[in-house]
Image (cartoon, grey):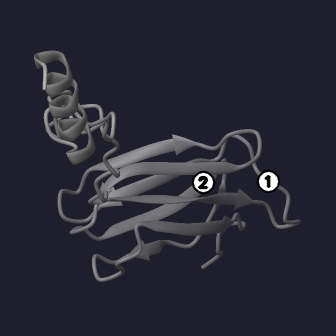
Amino acid sequence: MNTAKLYSVSLLALISLGTGWPQQTDPNANKPSVFLENNRYKPPKPSNARTIQGMVKDQADNPVAGAIVQLKNIKTSKVVSFATKDDGKFAFHELFLDADYELLAKRGDLTTPLKKVSLYDTRKEVTINFKLEPPQKQ
């Protein structure tokens, strides 16, 4: 046998066995499995805060714009006021879950009864609606 025939036979034998030539596999096989960028989706962390929202209405069930809703943190005695929007709505965000709150609404000489949200109320979104009433005569 001459050298050229021996070389071509050897080459065919290597090709048929699948050794000696790199095989084409998954194109992603050479990519690293470690990601150095921090752009993967992370679900939002659960909030440890509470929102108290609601609406102030008059005796005829119409929304009251400009009513003052007062929120008092019983633990700190801090009072925060919010003027209702044109639709009568109010909202207090990022409130502590471990505190009791008292709320009331006023507009002129009209007031609402005091409402409370307890620290034992585990809801993170609390809805309280108020109805303005004339002052009680004693």
Q: Position of residue 122 (x, y in %)?
A: 34, 78
Of residues 2 and 125, which is closer to you in this image? 2
If you read the primary sequence from the N terminus, does the residue marked by circle 1 or circle 2 appear first? 1
Q: Name the secondary structure under disc 1.
A: loop
Nearest to the eye among marks 1 and 2: give it: 1
Q: Is residue 132 above or below residue 95?
A: below
Please, is residue 49 above or below residue 130 in the view? above
Q: For mark 2, give the secondary structure.
A: strand
Task: Write down the quadrant of residue 105 in the picture.
Answer: bottom right
Tell me the number on the disc at residue 63: 1
Quadrant for the N terminus in the image: top left
* Residue positioned 46% across, 63% down in the render: 103
Hey, which residue is sitting farthest bottom in the picture? 120
Task: Return the residue found at the far top.
Answer: 4
Residue 60 in view of the camera = yes
Image location (x, y in percent) of residue 73: 28, 59
The disc labelled 1 sits on which kind of residue? Pro
Residue 6: image location, x then y, percent: 14, 27
| Residue drawn where x is 72% and y is 49% of the image | 88
Residue 31: in sight, yes or no?
no
The one nearer the camera, 65 or 108, is 65
Query: Relative to the observer, which residue lies in front, 38 or 94?
Result: 38
Residue named by callout 2: 106
Q: Amino acid at mark 2?
A: Lys
Dot 1 and dot 2 residues touching (CB under 8 Å)? no
In the displayed structure, does residue 16 sit left or right of residue 90?
left
